[in-house]
Image (cartoon, rainbow, N blue to C red):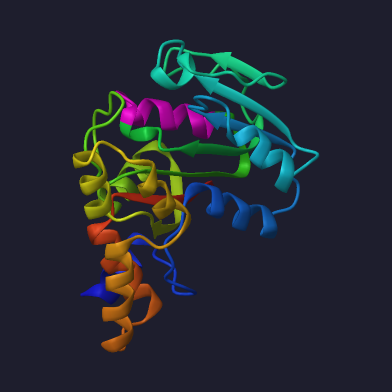
Amino acid sequence: MLKKLARDWHVPEDFSRQTSSFSMAEHLAGRMTGIYKILDLGCGTGTSADFFKKIIPRAQWIGLDIEESPEVASRTKTGAEFHSFDGINIPFGDNSFDLIFSNQVLEHVRHPVELLKEARRVLKPEGFMVGSTSHLEPYHSFSVRNYTPYGFRLLLEESGLHLEEIRPGIDSLTLIIRLGLGRPKFFSRWWRKESPLNKLISLFGKLSWKSHAEINVLKLIFCGQFAFIARKN
């Protein structure tokens, strides 16, 4: 069963570490040449601008978000290009971007198919969308939906995008406990390193001789967030 799910969900088998949208973007940048223009879709405070300046120094970064959100309201970053939109219609021409980045945004989107069709439109042919979204994460910051890995694959297909790979992020139990304790700063470490339940799943997987792909599937079943890479055909 786990092997079949790994095939259906496009789960890789090279390693089974917990990951994030940022590490996925760095991985993609390492194997993809010709990234000249990047759109951060749902950029919020704009923190990814410095990240991409570090890993792809010559690329042009553009941030896009709705006008009213807690993250946009708290934005203090200067020296970067920001635009606003209505949450669906992306104000750029066809085939404009080599890469779209979207960190924990799609769970807040009311019309995801329409938005992802727009993302496909502004991507160049063979361009990539990389990001992360919620699976079993509790309600936060006006979130309106969570996605299963399978459901997310269907969403991308309906939008005209092809899922290249999906990997587990922080586990759901850690996110639930974090919320219950009032979001203490101590829990921030679990985005940078393997979270507790993911550690237990890794241990179980090794003791039961599971492959990396099978361990990834187990983590995806219980994850709070997952990261993805999609491509425009």
Q: 176 or 167, which lies in front?
A: 176
Using the rendered image of the protein, determine whether residue 136 is visible from the camera's viewpoint.
Answer: no
> Does 171 sit left or right of 62 as displayed?
left
Residue drawn at the location 55% of the way across and 54% of the way down: 23
**Whether residue 60 is situated above or below residue 15 in the rendered picture:** above
Residue drawn at the location 41% of the way across and 46% of the way down: 188
Give the total number of marks visible in the rendering: 0
Using the rendered image of the protein, determine whether residue 137 is visible from the camera's viewpoint.
Answer: yes
Return the residue found at the far right: 58
Q: Which SS type dominates the magenta stretch?
A: helix
Residue drawn at the location 27% of the way across and 53% of the way down: 174
Residue 110 belongs to the span the image colors magenta: yes
Query: x and y percent of residue 205 in the render?
Result: 30, 80
Task: Report which quarter residue 179 is drawn in.
Answer: top left
Query: x and y percent of residue 135 in the render?
Result: 27, 47
Residue drawn at the location 50% of the way across and 31% of the way down: 119
**Whether residue 181 is situated above or below residue 208 in the rendered picture:** above
Residue 158 belongs to the span the image colors magenta: no
Task: Report which quarter residue 100 is drawn in.
Answer: top right
**Whether residue 140 is situated above or below residue 69 in the rendered picture:** below
Q: 78 or 146, which lies in front?
A: 78
Task: Report which quarter residue 28 is drawn in.
Answer: bottom right
Query: x and y percent of residue 84 in the render?
Result: 53, 13
**What are the residue bounds of the magenta stretch?**
108-121
Task: Name the quarter where the N terminus is drawn.
Answer: bottom left
> Does 93 sit left or right of 3 as displayed?
right
**Whether residue 60 is situated above or below residue 68 in the rendered picture:** below
